[in-house]
Image (cartoon, grey):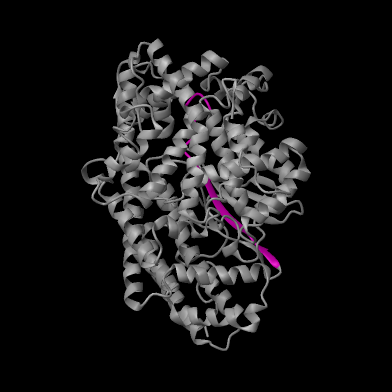
Amino acid sequence: MGGEGDQGDTVTGNPLLDRSFPVPFDRIVPGDVAPAVEETLQWARRRLDELAEDRDAPGDATLAGLDAVARKVARTWAPVSHLANVAATPELREAHAAALPDVVRFGSRLFHHEGLYRLLQSFASSPEGAALVGLPRRHLEKTLREFRRAGADLPRDGKTALEEMQVELSDLGRRFEENLLEETAAYGKLVAERSTVDGLPDTALERASQLAGARGLEGWLITLDMPSVEAVLKHATDRTLRQEVHAAYLDRCTGGERDNRSLIPRMLELRRRIASLLEYDDFPGYRLETAMAGSGGRVRAFLDDLTVATRPFYERDAIDLERCARRFGLGALAPWDVSFLMEKLRKERFDLDDEALRPWFPLDQVQSGLLEIASRLFGLSVAQVDNPAVWHPDVGYFEVRDETGLHLGSFYADWFPRDTKRQGAWMDALIAGGPRNGGFERHLAFIGGNFTPPTASRPSLLTHREVRTLFHEFGHLLHHVASRVEIPERGGTNVAWDWVEVPSQIMENWTWRREALDLFARHHETGTPLPAETLERLVAARRFMGGWSQMRQLSLANLDLELHRSWDAETPVMEYAAATLRPFVPSDSFVQRHLLPSFAHLFGGGYASAYYSYLWSETLEADAFSRFEDEGVLNPATGRAFLEAVLSQGDRRDPNELFREFMGRDPNEGALIRRNLGTTLNGDIPL
């Protein structure tokens, strides 16, 4: 009988079948994908049948065998899907697209395997299964729930229909993201006149000039990657340029061969049909069954309550922006004016310029300070080591060890934009390790983003927002590499979706604290620390335009929820989105264009019916950070308590229990409003 080690545990000719650590990314080529996936899936199918035929095996052994199969498939496929995000050449994308349907079908059929399902059901109802406690019991119950949620109880024709819908949905998601990648990379506006780019910071001007020069052009090249877009919308004095770049950014994937508008209705319909086939009222009912919120109705109430609490602050901010627009002679507030006017108001009120802070936040120094914070708080030693087996020269590689020197895991860091790299910032779990067979298997992960890259004359200098993003993604990373859960499927970030952002969002708090900033906020040329008065102004401005920002997050969460609850296929989806967003913005001009065709969180990522989770998790972490404030933001005892109660626990226990273990009480639901917006409006309206 074949065991779990029968399929390529060490070095083979195909790097995707190489089980050495870390992944040999430098050897992977698109031609490796098809044979590696085919060999892995053939082995996996045989192994599943062997497990189902061995009816005398102990139930826990059957479950462990099932987990081992899923892990091996993931070990082959994870590098492929990762490269499709960071090194998406046309050849790699073609190989990924060709293999994806087979991988999705296997995932569907794994949970439709009647023999395995019956064995696990029998085990659960046996005295041995009933005697399970703690993590093994939780894992068995959740695995059986995954079988049911995947359609294991459906008749054969229902399973076939479900599988076909899942394959189609995955392919549509792939196409959505590829369209967005291509559309973003295709845009380039060459500016020949210096006056047109007046107001742009020196960093942005130098980069735009370098981008033009790299293409043999003279002038300044404006692209649609975030550093370029943000520089124009925040700082360009030429209103026509701001309007053009704003339109180009939101018009991505709204026409031609890369039009995502036609994909969205089909994806929404498929999700609705999947939920109906599985006998749920709607897709949120299906999706949120496993979340802390538990139902679309509870999310609806959460968003409504938070919207009511946020609206007075939002209306105050909107009035401020409208007045500022008139003062600058712009007339009615337009969406391409908002970031520009916010920067003007921030400068006026707080004498704070986000661009002027860049010299104190060189990327390498910020990263070193972050690692020092992880050491002091969590007892984790993180060191960069040489690893040439990467997909791009910009990629760094790091090892993470605990206080005993145990190698917990490693990670890649990839921070700069490329045409073959997706937008945004994210963490990917490449290998899930943890305690195993008396030892410890190492975790492997990726964190990356699209930060301001270095230029010919200066290193990568970050805005404070980019610093917060780096800390955020590192929080996800800690959740993965610090996991000490014996069953990987219940470890790391394999948790409720509205809990997974707690470790990431709580890390952002340290970017506002003097004790932490002293470890990295030093001028890249002089080495002088961030002046105390500058920090005071930075902290004072933390809530600046907080109502506007929070209302934007609420608008996106509301759009996500209602698209999956209330949208009718007879209503054009772009019109529906505009109408749904309208109550959250000042005027119709703000919804004439909107982000739906590029909303990758919903149609390329995993946030469908779950975008609310950012706000839900933020409510929890805003409260949890109060313990650090009370006991010391770099207090190692508090850090170790968070490590033991949250970061290392994965899904070992219910997240409500983990929160109570750390805080000693239930969450304070008002913590988010108090931190982000304050307890009074204009100093005289108590909330």
Q: Nearer the viewer, residue 341 or 634?
A: 341
Q: Can residue 474 be seen from the camera position used here?
A: no
How far across and down, in percent of the image, does residue 145 sit?
A: 51, 69
At horizontal 62% and vertical 49% (from top left) the residue drawn is 478
Q: Residue at 53% across / 85% down in the picture?
A: 1
In the image, farthest residue toward the left: 256
Locate the C terminus by quadrant: top right
Q: How many marks?
A: 0
Q: Locate residue 529 relative to residue 605 in the image: left or right.
A: right
Front position in the image: 638 or 73: 638
Q: Which residues are magenta?
A: 439-459
Q: Is residue 588 visible?
A: yes
> Within the magenta stretch, is there residue 544?
no
Near-viewer residue (122 or 108)? 122
Q: Is residue 302 left or right of residue 528?
A: left
Check if residue 452 falls in the magenta segment. yes
Q: Looking at the picture, does residue 108 appear above or below residue 413?
A: below
Residue 55: give x, y in percent of width and height.
54, 88
Q: Quadrant of residue 444?
A: bottom right
**Could you tell me residue 85's position as x and y percent?**
42, 49
Horizontal and vertical percent position of residue 52: 49, 83
Q: Residue at x 56, y 20 (%)?
A: 682
Q: Quadrant location of residue 650? A: bottom right
Query: From this viewpoint, which residue is outermost toward the bottom?
Result: 56
